[in-house]
Amino acid sequence: MKATFVDIPGIVLLEPKVFSDDRGSFFESYNRKTLAEAGIATEFVQDNQATSRRAVLRGLHYQVKHAQAKLIRVLKGEIYDVAVDLRRFSPTFGKWYGVTLSEENMLQLYLPADFAHGYLVLSETAEVLYKASDFWAPEHERCILWNDPDLAISWPLSGQPIVSEKDALGKRFCHADLPVEIERIAR
């Protein structure tokens, strides 16, 4: 698996080694040892899977307690995946990273804990699978507005996305409750 480190420390783009022949293809989508060699020693405790239609935008979600590192991949279709750095003491605090993930490119995106996460469906439908390092804690879940002008995320949109009521009521980044675990970075 090839690991590419992006401009925001901690985010890793992973490209699996794909073996193809006339029968189809095979690749390892998760290998703890391979990830550890890339500097990712996260223990995942939960898998989540979502199916959405074109123009659905989910996020930007995070948890203020029990922050979740995530490993995201697309089983079917194509999405534009976005991560926002919520680590108050990081030099990239408030910066975002976006990448297209698809069943075709087979890329995976690793996000450390303390990042907000969201994605926009670019294909007719998309099936997204992601591993999480902590359990979903609805009482600690928060949402930042997908279209916050301070973040200025360049979503590849034509028109308005389809968002849930919860996501439409997200907070501006400047008013967001940040994860409690953020303080551990200050050392």
Image (cartoon, helix red, strand yellow):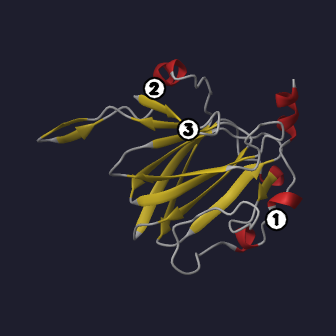
| Front-lying residue, 88 or 138 | 88
Which label is found at residue 31?
2
Q: Which of the image's four quarters has the C terminus? A: top right
The CA span between labels 3 and 2 is 21 Å
Q: Could you classify mark 1 by the number of other residues whose Cα lies within 10 Å: few (under 14), some (14-19), or many (20 or more)?
A: some
| Tag 1: amino acid | Lys
* Residue holding disc 3: 6
Label 3 element class: loop
Mark 3 or mark 2, which has the lower sequence index? 3
Residue 130 in the image: state x and y as whole percent.
54, 45
Q: Residue at x 41, y 29 (%)?
A: 2
> In terms of image quadrants, where is residue 58?
bottom right
| Tag 2: amino acid | Asn
The CA span between labels 1 and 3 is 27 Å
Q: Is residue 101 above or below residue 3?
A: below
Q: Decide: marks 3, 2 in contact (CB < 8 A)?
A: no
| Front-lying residue, 145 or 138 | 145
Residue 150 in the image: state x and y as whole percent.
76, 62
Number of marks in the rendered image: 3
Q: Determine the residue located farthest toward the bottom in the rendered image.
A: 159
| Tag 3: amino acid | Val
In the image, 1: left or right of 85?
left
* Residue holding disc 1: 171
